[in-house]
Image (tube, helix red, strand yellow):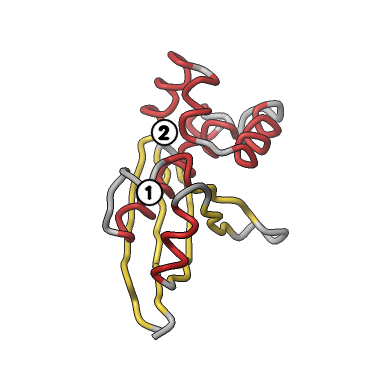
Amino acid sequence: MAVYGIGTDIVLLPRIETLYAKYGERFARRVLGPDEMTEFERRRGRGPTDGVAGTDRAVRYLAKRFAGKEAFSKALGLGLRGPMTLLSLQILNDRRGRPYPVARKALAPYLESLGVTAHVSLSDEKDSALAFVILETKS
């Protein structure tokens, strides 16, 4: 396999907290796809994460998905414009918690035409969320 692209992004949690406080669910729906939104709503009802920076689980989830999509767009080399948009990619978790991307809309056939496989890593600590994405080709 050969590396097609690498992308990384860091998001400050206070920035996402401010946007979420101002726009509420409208902001979340501009960033998250339907399956991500379901998980976001589930986490929203669970309260704060061990008091870290006073940020709740839902906002941390939202920030990591935002960073992941930014990093994915950088690895792809397109930025956030068609076919790569915030809503054309979902980042879900498998049973063990490992994040994996699910392409939607016009992004799915585009990625298939490139023949790329994606690897995603998400993390958060104190006041920031980080994402790292590697796209590989089969040849």
Judging from the image, what secondary structure is the residue with disc 2 in?
Answer: helix
76 or 119, which lies in front? 76
Judging from the image, what secondary structure is the residue with disc 1 in?
Answer: loop
Residue 83 horizontal/vertical position (percent):
37, 49
What's under tag 1, amino acid-wise?
Pro
Residue 46 horizontal/vertical position (percent):
71, 30
The residue at the point 60 percent across, 60 percent down is 98
Residue tagged 2: 13
Q: Compute the Cα span from label 2 to label 1.
A: 27 Å
Asked if 7 appears above or below 58 in the picture, the reply is: below
What's under tag 2, amino acid-wise?
Leu
Q: How many marks?
A: 2
Residue tagged 1: 83
Asked whether the viewer can see residue 101, the reply is: yes
Q: How many C-alpha atoms fall within 10 Å of the one at disc 2: few (<14), some, or many (≥20)?
A: many
The residue at the point 35 percent across, 82 percent down is 2
Residue 77 horizontal/vertical position (percent):
27, 58
The residue at the point 52 percent across, 29 percent down is 55
